[in-house]
Image: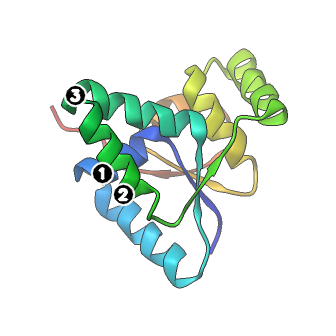
Amino acid sequence: MKGHVLDANALYRFLMDQPGADIVEDLFKRARDSKTTLLLSVINWGEVYYNIAMKQGIPEAQAFMAEVRLLPISVINADEPVTELAAKFKAGYGLPYADCFAAAITGRANVLVTADVKDFKKVPWLQILPLPQHKP
């Protein structure tokens, strides 16, 4: 199975059972079955925590993120090399800053799972697994 990186939007949709949650759930099942993990930047982990805390409260965010720890996810720290690469994405492509960390850990070898295709399409070589757009 090719490596997959979740951006904050992908994990949030999974947790909130929003459009595309089934795609992310399938990736979790495939990762579990192949004894691998999906990747998630610690910056994107924090973005999910923040969004849940703002909408539902800190206790709910803590509960959701405790469940995330049980999933086949490897949270990648924002060390200096990752942060430098994220800064290059920000400077070179103008991506939103947190998204730059998802792009940085995706690199050329992995596939980014996101609904924010418009932003990430600015990086021509980035492989993307798109999630459905929200319908108004």
Nearest to the observer: residue 90 or residue 84: 84
Residue drawn at (22%, 28%) of the image: 55
Nearest to the observer: residue 4 or residue 92: 4
Q: Is residue 33 left or right of residue 9?
A: right
Query: Within the image, what quadrant is residue 28 found in?
Result: bottom left
Q: State the image coordinates of residue 133 (x, y, percent, origin top left).
A: 30, 41
Q: State the image coordinates of residue 25 (x, y, percent, origin top left).
A: 36, 66
Point out the residue furthest to the bottom here.
33
CA gap, disc 1 and disc 2: 9 Å
Q: How is the image coloured?
A: rainbow
Q: Disc 3 marks which residue?
A: 55
Q: Does label 3 or label 1 sit earlier along the sequence? A: 1
Q: Is residue 133 left or right of residue 27?
A: left
Mark 1 in CB contact with mark 2 (< 8 angstroms): yes
Q: Disc 1 marks which residue?
A: 15
Q: Residues within 10 Å of mark 2 (few under 14, many from 20)?
A: few
Residue drawn at (74%, 19%) of the image: 92
Point out the residue furthest to the front here.
59
Residue drawn at (56%, 27%) of the image: 98
CA gap, disc 2 and disc 3: 18 Å
Which of the labelled discs sits on residue 67, or is there none? 2
Query: Within the image, what quadrant is residue 87 found in?
Result: top right
Label 2 amino acid? Glu
Q: State the image coordinates of residue 67 (x, y, percent, origin top left).
A: 36, 57
